[in-house]
Amino acid sequence: MAPIFSGLVHVRFASRPSVAGRRSRQTERDACLCCVQTSLASSLGTMSSIDQLNAADVTGFHGALLEHLKRGAVPPLVPSATLWKAIEDNHHCNIALWDEEDQARRRDVPDSAIANSKRLIDGYNQRRNDAIERIDELVLIALPSLPDTAQLHSETIGALIDRLSILSLKLFHMDWQTRRGDVDADHRGISSTRLARLREQHADLAWCLDELVRGCLAGALRFKVYRQFKMYNDPKFNPWLTG
């Protein structure tokens, strides 16, 4: 069974097999995640400077946190560094957003339930964007002073980490679609094709993150903190909230 996440973590995701199969797969996942925890602890626990930020650790953390929240695996070790707290908060928000977006499409619940989901989505999205900006702030503080002559990169490190977080969710859920026993072979085949494309996108984006970090450290690239200035949640800017 091919691993979903490239780099540091190789977590195998499964559908819902028999009881014996679930026990076997759980044992396999626990052993796998034990190795992941050791690698993460070794790598992240010694992370003291921005030159140690890399896509393998980020994607490994994303995968391990998903396994913990969705399958009850042991939680990943989060370094005390403030940067990793922001990365964790961003990933938590994306996971919550995914679940609420699914709930908001239901047609078997009253409109009030959909309205509640939409409000939760607004809150999670605000926190998600705040975490992206916080990641960028902390990275820029840790980086050497970037020269004005360096090429300006339109996408920030925080934005790339956020996109990797979202892709990890797509990989997780698309992989499950390939293993469902209650759908036909065509559905699983389409899902497998999409999963392969998502894996390619994930690997490409991970490479882009590493290249941006390396470029900034070399003084060849730079980025800025781009404020989202979300207006719809602020009564001072949204007139419909002041009525």
Image (spheres, grey):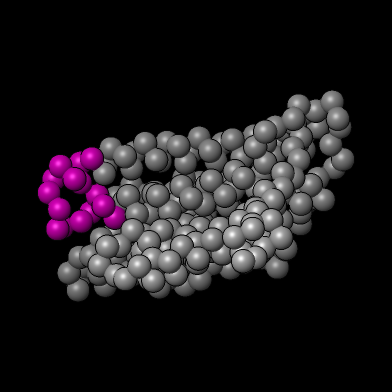
Nearer the observer, 29 or 167: 167
Q: Does the magenta-highlighted stretch encompass residue 78?
A: no
Task: In the displayed orientation, state which residue is furthest to the front.
Answer: 243
Q: Residue at x 17, y 69 (%)?
A: 18
Q: Residue at x 87, y 40 (%)?
A: 145
- Residue 233: percent from left, percent from top: 62, 60
Q: Is residue 193 above or below residue 34?
A: above
Quadrant for residue 51, please give it.
top right
Q: Please tell me how many numbered marks the rendered image carries.
A: 0
Q: Which residues are magenta?
A: 176-190
User: Is 26 placed left or right of 137 in the picture?
Assistant: left
Q: Residue at x 19, y 45 (%)?
A: 187
Instruction: Tell me, yes or no, if residue 172 can be seen here.
Output: yes
Q: Is residue 84 above or below residue 20?
A: above
- Residue 196: percent from left, percent from top: 34, 38
Which SS type dominates the magenta stretch? helix
- Residue 71: percent from left, percent from top: 37, 69
User: Is 194 placed left or right of 18 in the picture?
Assistant: right
Task: In the displayed orientation, state which residue is furthest to the left.
Answer: 184
Instruction: Tell me, yes or no, if residue 31 can be seen here.
Output: no
Nearer the observer, 179 or 129: 129
Quadrant for residue 110, please give it.
bottom left
